[in-house]
């Protein structure tokens, strides 16, 4: 059975497909999932469940976020694929409306399902007498990561306009906005300009990649070394936080909205990704490795949308034992929590696989007509 699956995936993969792009997207989604599971805790306290972060109690864990904050990779790959897809659609005389409609349907169809399910769950919890603060905390935990999909959708819609935009322009915008916010006492709301500008940096870099404007190895080293040096300087001497994700109670967040430190860090990640292209392509020539990446990409949206639900489900089942389980219900304030938390990751993953089995069908509904794609297990859909 396994051999047959490997054969089907290998046979169904187009000869010209860049498998490294699929691997980078899988790494991006995997980083987000593991990052959320490791730096988010649900604490049971006097009949209420609240969200807590070990980063607030143990700021020395900030380097963990350097590994698992991988959203820049998703926007890099997304910009590359969107620019290439739009150029291909124009070449086939597919209208912009048809092209965008197909991409938005693939993006938001599974989102509608998770929103519907969690609306029903929230109503049922309240009807059964659950504490309002608990319901709000859990629903927010599921829905809050959806912000990035709205940004990604907006950038996708603007692809014809931004595909030729040099990444330096949005990078300069992020720096200017930070200058106004932090040095010139500007209004706080101006920071939200960076919600678009910050993610435009890797997105435009990906679009330049699609137009063969990057010498991937030279550019990779420049981005990696320059981005890392700039990030270190901003953290050490400009007062930016070391954590690349938001920390509850912190005066400044690198992500809400993105700062110049986050943008520089994203550039370093993009540089590392470009340098990894060759090794990834060699590794992915092995059928077993490629099959794993291909199948993971088939469920990328489902995994992203339901990973917080999996963590919540395991936490809720643990509460039924009547015990406060270390690393699951306890306050993330010390080494004991850090040591206990990894033991729960397999349980989260198992429940996530169950969610994947139940909901991944909404990621692959067939669509007919120009500009629409038909996805098969052998051909993962693009960003």
Image (cartoon, rainbow, N blue to C red):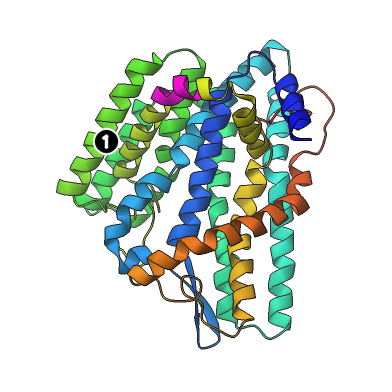
Residue 9: x and y in percent read 72, 27
Asked if residue 252 can be seen in this view, the reply is: no
Magenta span contains residue 116: no
- Determine the residue located farthest toward the bottom in the rendered image: 46
Q: Left of 181 or right of it: where is 10? A: right
Residue 42: x and y in percent read 50, 71
Q: Which quarter shows the C terminus? A: top right
Name which residue lies at 42% across and 29% down. 273
Residue 352 or 80: which is nearer the viewer? Answer: 352
Name which residue lies at 61% across and 16% down. 87
Name which residue lies at 23% across and 54% down. 185
**Vertical placement of residue 51 versus 48, above or below:** above
Segment colored magenta: 274-280
Asked if residue 62 can be seen in this view, the reply is: yes
Q: Left of 142 or right of it: where is 238? A: left
Residue 104 quadrant: top right
Residue 11: x and y in percent read 74, 20
Q: Which quarter shows the N terminus? A: top right
Mark 1 surroundings: few (<14), some (14-19) or many (≥20) residues within 10 A: many
Residue 331 quadrant: bottom left
Name which residue lies at 58% across and 23% down. 19
Which residue has dot 1 on it? 228
**Vertical placement of residue 263 versus 256, above or below:** above
| Figure disc tally | 1
């Amino acid at each position: 059975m396994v051999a047959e699956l490997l054969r089907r995936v290998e046979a169904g993969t187009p000869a010209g497909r860049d498998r490294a792009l699929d691997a980078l997207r899988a790494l991006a989604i995997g980083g987000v999932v593991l990052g959320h599971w490791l730096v988010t805790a649900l604490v049971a306290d006097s009949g209420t469940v609240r969200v807590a972060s070990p980063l607030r109690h143990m700021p020395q864990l900030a380097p963990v976020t350097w590994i698992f904050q991988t959203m820049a990779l998703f926007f890099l790959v997304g910009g590359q694929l969107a620019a290439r897809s739009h150029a291909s659609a124009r070449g086939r005389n597919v209208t912009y409306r048809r092209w965008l409609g197909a991409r938005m349907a693939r993006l938001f169809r599974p989102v509608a399902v998770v929103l519907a399910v969690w609306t029903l769950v929230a109503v049922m919890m309240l009807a059964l007498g659950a504490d309002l603060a608990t319901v709000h905390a859990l629903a927010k935990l599921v829905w809050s990561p959806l912000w990035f999909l709205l940004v990604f959708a907006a950038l996708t819609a603007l692809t014809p306009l931004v595909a030729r935009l040099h990444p330096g322009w949005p990078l300069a915008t992020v720096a200017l906005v930070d200058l106004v916010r932090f040095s010139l006492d500007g209004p706080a709301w101006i920071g939200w300009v960076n919600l678009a500008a910050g993610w435009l940096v890797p997105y435009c870099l990906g679009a330049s990649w699609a137009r063969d404007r990057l010498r991937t190895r030279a550019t990779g080293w420049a981005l990696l070394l320059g981005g890392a040096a700039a990030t270190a300087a901003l953290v050490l001497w400009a007062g930016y936080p070391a954590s690349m994700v938001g920390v509850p109670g912190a005066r400044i967040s690198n992500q809400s909205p993105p700062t110049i430190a986050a943008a520089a860090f994203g550039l370093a990640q993009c540089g590392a990704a470009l340098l990894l292209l060759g090794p990834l392509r060699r590794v992915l020539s092995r059928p077993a490795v490629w099959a794993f990446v291909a199948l993971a990409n088939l469920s990328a949206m489902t995994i992203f949308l339901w990973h917080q639900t999996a963590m919540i489900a395991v936490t809720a089942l643990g509460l039924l034992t009547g015990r406060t389980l270390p690393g699951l219900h306890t306050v993330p304030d010390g080494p004991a929590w850090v040591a206990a938390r990894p033991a729960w990751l397999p349980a989260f993953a198992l429940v996530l696989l169950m969610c994947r089995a139940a909901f991944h069908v909404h990621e692959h509904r067939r669509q007919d007509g120009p500009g629409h794609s038909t996805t098969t297990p052998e051909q993962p859909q693009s960003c």
